[in-house]
Image (tube, rainbow, N blue to C red):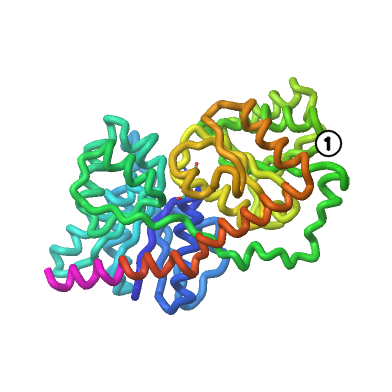
Amino acid sequence: MTIGIVCYPTFGGSGVVATELGLELSKRGHEIHFITYNQPVRLELVSNNVHYHEVNVPEYPLFHYQPYELALSSKLVDMVKLHNIEILHVHYAIPHAYAAYMAKKMLQEEGIHVPIVTTLHGTDITLVGSHPFYKPAVTFSINKSDAVTAVSKSLKDDTMRLFDIKNNIHVVPNFIDLDKYNHRFTDCQRGMMAADNEKIITHISNLRPVKRVQDVIKVFYGIQKEMPAKLMFIGEGPEKENVEQQCNDLGILDKVIFFGRSNEIDKILCFSDLFLLPSETESFGLAALEAMASGVAVISSNTGGIPEVNINGYSGFLSDVGDVDSMIKNALHILNDEQRLKTFKANARTQAEKFDLHAIVPQYEAIYEDTLSKCLVL
Ligand code: GMT
């Protein structure tokens, strides 16, 4: 199949999932065209069957807001015609599903029929999409997609509850390339980050308020009071300065290593003991899955789709959003006993194996095939 993938090219989970999906589909013999405003961060290799087409929005001072949707839909029309793209898979409803629908209608005028698969990732539904400003357009885009997927059952339920949805929504969870997390690095050098007796706690996110990064620091503060520990803090975002200030105020700045954005997450996770994800909402929690694939136990909130990933008392523990004391108690319970820590780490890896990309990517292929065959009948 020749598949067009539209996504946000940034470090966010939706862009990561879209990119990894495209790369795996290309390995499975499909021709992939990424269409977005920047080269996706995890798209390192463009090859004979992986292409990247940049969407440019010419700046006109006349426009107060530059019309990205318009530029994207025009680009989609051009790319579908030029490369004979058979199906468009758009990640994130706003504005991708909307722009894809416009492209589809324009192409229809020329007798070209391209079905649209929309994947809902979370904040397009739970935080932004349900806002009254966007709701009609998001509802319309979902209902007009030829197939819709959501990354967890929880997100599907939220979408059905918040919008007037007529379409069926398939649950296709986030996935992981387990081979990448099999740690054959010669440079998994724990010693460079922490002393042998120190436990290593890790957090990775885009440091948006929804991630409750202040809770990450509070939980780490509680842990390091009881045992030697270091915190690996990975990511950039709006809460970064507040977090640095918080660490300074608590007197733990020397125990926190700030990595900024990193493409070497697997190398950092390989020496981590515990991953913290206390988010306010989280449709799935790809970062937790990446940690678990590295054999890192997870202390998380119990919001959204996280319970579908992190199993309470098995791969880690779940607490109510904001219940920092419970998170500290659970973290210490795991870390205090070497044998228990080992068991939780092993369980985390076993649980991650359920989300192996070799099991999940074929689910998308099946949806594409089904969607294409239905469109041929019409
Ligand atoms: O979590 C973020 O801030 C990024 C966000 C995105 O839209 O890229 O991630 C969402 O999609 C990921 C991939 O499907 C999910 O694993 C994340 O849980 C989800 N984030 C939220 O729901 C907050």
Query: Residue 63 placed where, x, y %?
Result: 32, 37
Q: Residues within 10 Å of mark 1 (few under 14, many from 20)?
A: some
Relative to 179, is 161 on the left or the right?
left
Q: Where is 271 relative to 83, above or below?
A: above
Q: Quadrant of residue 335?
A: top right
Q: In the rendered image, which quarter contains the N terminus? A: bottom left
Main SS of the magenta part reads helix
Query: Residue 209 placed where, x, y %?
Result: 53, 30
Query: Residue 299 placed where, x, y %?
Result: 62, 40
* Residues shaded magenta: 368-378
Q: Is residue 17 visible?
A: yes
Query: Residue 140 placed where, x, y %?
Result: 21, 45
Relative to 125, is 268 on the left or the right?
right
**Near-viewer residue (167 or 303):** 303
Q: Quadrant of residue 239?
A: top right
Relative to 361, is 298 on the left or the right?
right
Q: In the rendered image, which quarter contains the C terminus? A: bottom left
Residue in the image at 78% along x and 59% along y: 188
Q: Secondary structure at mark 1?
A: loop
Q: Is residue 73 visible?
A: no
Residue in the image at 41% along x and 51% along y: 151
The question of residue 372 being in magenta is answered with yes
Q: Where is 278 relative to 10, above or below?
A: above
Q: Is label 1's Cβ within 8 Å of ligand 1?
A: no
Residue in the image at 45% along x and 77% along y: 28
| Residue at the top extreme of this rendering | 249
List the residue tagged with mark 1: 228
Relative to 224, is 38 on the left or the right?
left
The question of residue 83 being in magenta is answered with no
